[in-house]
C-alpha cells in the first residue's frame, strides 16, 4: 500500500528540478512547481502532493502557494518534528488541511542540497477511505456525536470538517473537569455522565494507541427516561467498540506498512543485507552496548579484488551477480543472532562481530573465504577490534582505521589479513 508512495516521495526529494526550484524559489510564479505537483498527484491518484521551502516556510500544493508553515499552527507541528529528527523520510497520520481535513497518511521526505543542508520537505498524501464514512453512519443511526481528539482535546477527525482543529473540547467548562480522567485512562473504556445545562449527556471515551488519539462518543439524553437511557448506553458502548476496532485496524495497516518501509529503507536491494544507512544507525548502538557491557567488537571491512575488471570485461549484470552471491555468503557465514553484515558501498562490505574472540573472528573470515573461493571470488580485508576498556573510538574513526588497513592489504589475493 505505502511502498510505492515512499519511492515516489524519495524520487521527488532527489529530483534536480525540485532542488533547483527551491534554491531560487520564484515566489511570484509558482506555476512550474504546482504543475509538477499536480502531475505527481494525478499520475499516481494521490489525494495530495506538496512541497515546503525550508528558507521561506512556504507550503506549495497543486494550486500553488497554499500557506506559510508556522509553529503556532497545530497543523504544522509535524513539520518541525520531522525536520528536527533528521530522518530521510517519515510516515505521519494527520488531517489534510488542503483536502477537506480528511484523515490521511502522509509520506514526508527531506530534501537536502549537495552539502547536506536542508532545502525543504516534500511528499504525498493518501486518503484513508472509510473511517470518516463509518463515523457519519453511526452518528446518524443513533443520533450520537463520534470523533477523535488529540492529547490537547483538539478534534482531529469529525464528520463536520468545520469542527476539526477549532479549539479543544476541554474549553467546555463542564468537560474540563473530566480532562485528566479522559486523558490519563489509556487502557479501558470510560463512561462519564455530565450535565451541560439544560442538557444531560453521556460521554464514552477510548484511547487509540495506534494514533495517540482518543475516540469520543457523546449523546444528549435529556429527553430519555431512565430505562431507555440504560439500553441506549449499552448500544453506545457497542458502537464505541466497533468504531474503536475499525479505527485501530485501519491504523494498524498503516503501522505494518511503516515497519515494512523501515526494513526496505535499511536493506540493500541488490544483496539483501543491510545498507550504509542501516550501518550508520545500527553500529553506534552496538558500540554503546559494547561500552556498557564491556565486550569487544570486531569490524571486518571486505573489498572484492578485481571487481572493476569483472564489470569492464564481463558486464554489469555479471558484476551484480557477484555482489548478490557475496551478500548471500556473508548472511550464511555470520552468527545470525549476534553479527551484522552491511554493504558499505560498491564492492565494499562490512561485518560487525560483537563479543567475538580472535579465533572466532578468524573462523568467520575463513568460512567467508572458502565459500567465496567456490564462486571464484577473491577479497582483501581490513580488521579493527574495539576494546571498550581501552578504546574510545567513534564510528567514523573506526571506519577510517579499517579503511587504511584495507588499502594496505588490497594487493593480497585470496587471503585475509589478521
Image: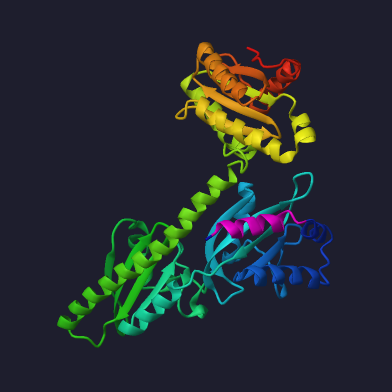
Secondary structure character of the magenta stretch overall: helix
User: What's drawn in magenta, residue-wise?
Assistant: 2-15
Q: Nearer the viewer, residue 403 or 152?
A: 403
- What is the x, y in percent for residue 255? 46, 55
- What is the x, y in percent for residue 115? 78, 44
Considering only vertical position in the picture, is 284 above or below 418?
Answer: below
- What is the x, y in percent for residue 254? 48, 59
Q: Left of 129 or right of it: where is 231? A: left
The quadrant holding residue 13 is bottom right
Q: Left of 95 or right of it: where is 173? A: left
Q: Residue furthest bottom?
A: 223
Q: Evaluate whether residue 327 shows in this view.
A: yes
The quadrant holding residue 44 is bottom right
Q: Is residue 3 magenta?
A: yes
Q: Where is the C terminus found, in terms of image quarters? A: top right
Query: How is the protein colored in the picture?
Result: rainbow
Q: Evaluate whether residue 61 shows in this view.
A: no
The quadrant holding residue 400 is top right
Q: Left of 381 or right of it: where is 126? A: left
Q: Nearer the viewer, residue 165 or 18?
A: 18
Q: Is residue 325 magenta?
A: no
Residue at 28% x, 64% y: name it.
190
Considering only vertical position in the picture, is 215 above or below 112?
Answer: below
Residue at 37% x, 78% y: name it.
145
Residue at 50% x, 15% y: name it.
360
Amino acid at each position: 500500500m505505502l511502498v510505492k508512495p515512499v519511492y515516489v516521495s524519495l524520487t521527488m526529494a532527489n529530483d534536480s528540478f525540485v532542488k533547483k526550484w527551491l534554491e531560487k524559489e520564484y515566489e511570484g510564479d509558482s506555476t512550474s512547481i504546482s504543475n509538477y505537483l499536480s502531475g505527481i498527484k494525478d499520475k499516481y491518484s494521490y489525494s495530495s502532493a506538496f512541497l515546503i521551502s525550508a528558507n521561506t516556510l512556504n507550503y506549495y500544493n497543486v494550486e500553488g502557494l497554499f500557506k506559510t508553515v508556522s509553529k503556532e499552527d497545530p497543523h504544522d507541528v509535524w513539520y518541525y518534528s520531522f525536520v528536527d529528527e533528521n530522518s530521510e523520510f517519515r510516515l505521519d497520520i494527520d488531517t489534510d488541511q488542503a483536502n477537506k481535513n480528511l484523515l490521511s497518511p502522509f509520506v514526508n521526505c527531506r530534501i537536502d542540497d549537495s552539502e547536506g543542508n536542508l532545502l525543504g520537505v516534500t511528499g504525498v498524501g493518501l486518503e484513508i477511505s472509510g473511517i470518516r464514512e463509518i463515523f457519519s453512519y453511526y452518528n446518524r443511526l443513533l443520533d450520537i456525536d463520534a470523533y477523535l481528539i488529540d492529547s490537547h482535546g483538539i478534534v482531529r477527525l469529525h464528520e463536520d470538517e468545520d469542527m476539526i482543529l477549532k479549539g479543544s473540547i476541554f474549553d467546555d467548562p463542564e468537560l474540563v473537569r473530566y480532562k485528566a480522567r479522559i486523558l490519563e485512562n489509556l487502557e479501558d473504556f470510560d463512561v462519564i455522565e455530565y450535565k451541560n445545562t439544560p442538557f444531560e449527556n453521556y460521554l464514552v471515551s477510548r484511547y487509540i494507541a495506534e494514533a495517540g488519539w482518543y475516540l469520543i462518543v457523546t449523546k444528549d439524553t435529556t429527553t430519555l427516561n431512565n430505562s431507555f437511557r440504560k439500553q441506549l448506553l449499552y448500544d453506545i458502548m457497542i458502537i464505541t467498540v466497533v468504531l474503536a476496532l475499525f479505527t485501530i485496524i485501519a491504523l494498524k495497516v498503516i503501522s505494518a506498512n511503516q515497519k515494512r518501509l523501515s526494513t526496505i529503507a535499511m536493506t540493500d536491494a541488490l544483496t539483501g543485507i543491510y545498507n550504509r544507512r542501516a550501518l550508520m544507525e545500527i553500529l553506534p548502538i552496538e558500540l554503546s552496548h559494547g561500552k556498557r557491557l564491556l565486550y569487544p567488537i570486531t569490524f571486518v571491512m571486505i573489498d572484492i579484488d578485481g571487481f572493476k575488471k569483472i564489470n569492464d570485461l564481463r558486464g554489469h549484470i555479471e558484476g551484480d551477480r557477484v555482489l548478490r552471491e557475496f551478500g548471500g555468503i556473508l548472511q550464511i557465514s555470520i552468527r545470525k543472532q549476534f553479527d551484522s553484515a552491511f554493504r558499505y558501498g560498491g564492492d565494499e562490505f562490512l561485518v560487525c562481530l560483537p563479543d567475538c574472540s580472535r579465533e572466532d573472528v578468524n573462523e568467520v573470515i575463513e568460512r567467508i573465504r572458502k565459500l567465496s573461493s567456490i564462486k571464484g571470488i577473491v577479497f582483501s580485508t581490513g580488521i579493527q577490534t574495539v576494546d571498550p576498556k581501552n578504546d574510545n573510538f567513534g564510528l567514523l574513526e573506526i571506519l577510517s582505521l579499517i579503511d587504511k588497513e584495507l588499502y594496505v592489504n588490497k594487493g593480497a589475493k585470496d587471503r585475509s589479513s589478521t
